[in-house]
Image (spheres, rainbow, N blue to C red):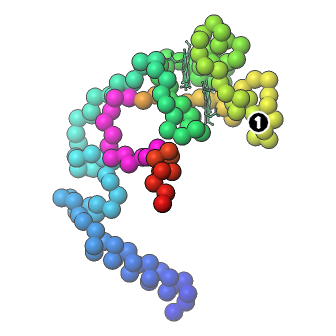
């Protein structure tokens, strides 16, 4: 038996064991990973749930860790973000913050990939929504066990 075959056989055996001890839900899908499809059967036709409402209370939300892109606390309905127009920068660009009252994009948004600080927003930070998102009032699909790093630090023996 080649080394590869032995490895494959081992993997198959291991997989079988996991399934043998794992629990199964009503439709026979093993409960190894929490299901994000909700209670409905994955292939069943169900009415589309109502769209969740975005949270637009203008309250800046605490970041869960320092490097997190802050979430957007205001409406972005109809804000165009194309090659020619960037509605976000109309308020968040350094030159416009005095009039708009918006927080300025931070210095990292001016840095190119070599760490060189440019005069204006760097192309790799141009499409804001690649990193900054709104929150909605949708209920989480799976439980969230996230712990703040301050608490994690306190747990050390
Ligand atoms: C009309 C001006 C305006 C426009 C346009 C705008 N913003 Fe804002 N933004 C603000 C203001 C003012 C705040 C401060 C909180 C508030 O009042 O909502 C803010 C807050 C934020 C924050 C939170 C910053 C933090 O530190 O918590 C993010 C992220 C953000 N905006 C991203 C965006 C993105 C992305 C777009 C484009 C899709 C955008 N904004 C368009 C005015 C604007
Ligand atoms: C590649 C991901 C990425 C993109 C694209 C991006 N940001 Fe950010 N943004 C971040 C991260 C990460 C932070 C927090 C750390 C930092 O400042 O770099 C942040 C911070 C901010 C803040 C808070 C600044 C402060 O000092 O409190 C604002 C406002 C913001 N971004 C607006 C924007 C806008 C407007 C755009 C589009 C022009 C944009 N960002 C594009 C990742 C991104």
Q: Secondary structure at mark 1?
A: loop
Magenta stretch: helix, strand or loop mostly: loop
Camera sees residue 101: yes
101 shown above or below 111 = above
User: In x, y percent, where is residue 63?
Assistant: 51, 34
Q: Residue at x 22, y 59 (%)?
A: 25
**What residue does disc 1 label?**
112
Across and down, in percent, residue 56 comes to 42, 19
- Residue at the (51%, 51%) spot, across then down: 153
Q: Is residue 115 above or below residue 60?
A: below
Question: What residue is rendered at 34% in x and 73% in y?
Answer: 18
Please report the bounds of the magenta region as a residue range: 136-148
User: Relative to 81, is 22 above or below?
Assistant: below
Locate residue 57, reporting x and y percent: 41, 18
Report the residue at 27% width, 34% height from top. 48
Expressed as whole percent of the image width and height from the top left, the position of residue 65 reads: 54, 40
The quarter of the image that holds ligand 1 is: top right
Q: Nearer the viewer, residue 131 or 70?
A: 70
Q: Quadrant of residue 118?
A: top right
Q: In this view, which residue lies farthest toward the front?
A: 157
Q: Nearer the viewer, residue 60 or 21?
A: 60
106 relative to 156, above or below: above
Left or right of 115, for residue 150: left
User: Callout 1: few (<14), some (14-19), or many (20+) C-alpha neighbours within 10 Å?
Assistant: some
Q: Quadrant of residue 120?
A: top right
**Does residue 145 show up magenta in the picture?**
yes
Single out the residue that lies furthest toward the bottom.
1
């Amino acid at each position: 038996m080649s080394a590869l075959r032995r490895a494959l056989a081992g993997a198959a055996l291991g997989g079988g064991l996991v399934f043998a001890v794992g629990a199964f839900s009503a439709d026979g899908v093993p409960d190894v990973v929490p299901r994000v499809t909700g209670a409905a059967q994955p292939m069943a036709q169900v009415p589309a749930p109502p769209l969740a409402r975005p949270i637009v209370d203008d309250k800046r939300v605490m970041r869960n860790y320092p490097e997190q892109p802050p979430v957007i606390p205001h409406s972005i309905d109809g804000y165009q973000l194309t090659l020619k127009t960037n509605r976000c920068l109309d308020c968040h660009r350094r030159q416009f913050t005095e009039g708009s009252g918006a927080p300025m994009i931070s210095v990292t948004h001016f840095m190119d990939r070599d760490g060189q600080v440019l005069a204006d927003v760097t192309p790799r930070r141009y499409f804001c929504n690649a990193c900054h998102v709104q929150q909605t009032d949708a209920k989480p699909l799976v439980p969230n066990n996230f712990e703040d790093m301050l608490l994690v630090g306190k747990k050390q023996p």
